[in-house]
Amino acid sequence: MKKGTTGHLYAAKNLRDAKVLVLDKETACVLEVAQGRPTPSSTTRCPSLALEAQRGNDAAVLTPFQQESWAVGLRLGDDALRVKVNAFIQSYRESGGFRATRDKWLPEQKAEFKRLGIPFFF
């Protein structure tokens, strides 16, 4: 799995008896699985969907083992910037910006999630 990701942190904490291969790039993780190596990989759903499309239905398990949230990191105490970032996110959401971005750049992923009965959000 990719070094420093939440999947890596989860495995280090919860899969102590497993031998975990940690790689620097997500593409290297997906390549390990795509080449038929027995090493499973923890990744986000979109790369998993791409791998599934290449190898067939048995290549990816799309059921998440943990829920995650996205975040924006800011310098501690920079309240003015925090207020601006939060205002932008709220405005972008209310104006349909996330929906428009999702529909423009992720239509195949959205359709595949729908086909599989998996909630898709962006």
Image (spheres, helix red, strand yellow):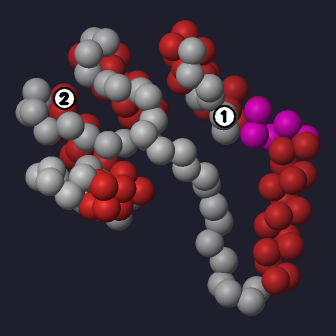
Count of all numbered marks drawn on residues in the image? 2
Which secondary structure is most common in the magenta stretch?
helix
On the image, which quarter does residue 64 sit in?
top left
Secondary structure, mark 2, is helix
Q: Is residue 19 above or below residue 65?
A: below
The C terminus lies in which quarter of the figure? top right
Q: Is residue 40 magenta?
A: no
Q: Position of residue 71 (x, y in %)?
A: 63, 61
Q: Residue at x 41, y 56 (%)?
A: 6
Label 2: which residue? Answer: 34
Q: Is residue 118 above or below residue 6?
A: above
On the image, which quarter does residue 79 sit in?
bottom right
Separation of marks 2 and 1 at Cα, in angstroms:
26 Å
Q: What stretch of residues is rendered in magenta?
A: 95-99
Q: Is residue 32 above or below residue 119?
A: below
Q: Residue at x 14, y 39 (%)?
A: 39
Observer able to see residue 54? no
**In the depicted view, which residue is nearer to us: 92 or 116?**
116
Q: Is residue 109 left or right of residue 87?
A: left
Q: Tell me the kind of residue under disc 1.
A: Phe
**Disc 1 packing (10 Å; few <14; some 14–19; many ≥20):** few
Secondary structure, mark 1, is loop
**In the depicted view, which residue is nearer to us: 107 or 116?**
116
Q: Tell me the kind of residue under disc 2.
A: Ala
Q: Kindly report which numbered mark, 2 or 1, lies closer to the viewer in this rendering.
A: 1
Q: Is residue 94 left or right of residue 67?
A: right
Q: Residue at x 32, y 25 (%)?
A: 60
Label 1: which residue? Answer: 121
Q: N-terminal of the two: label 2 or label 1? A: 2
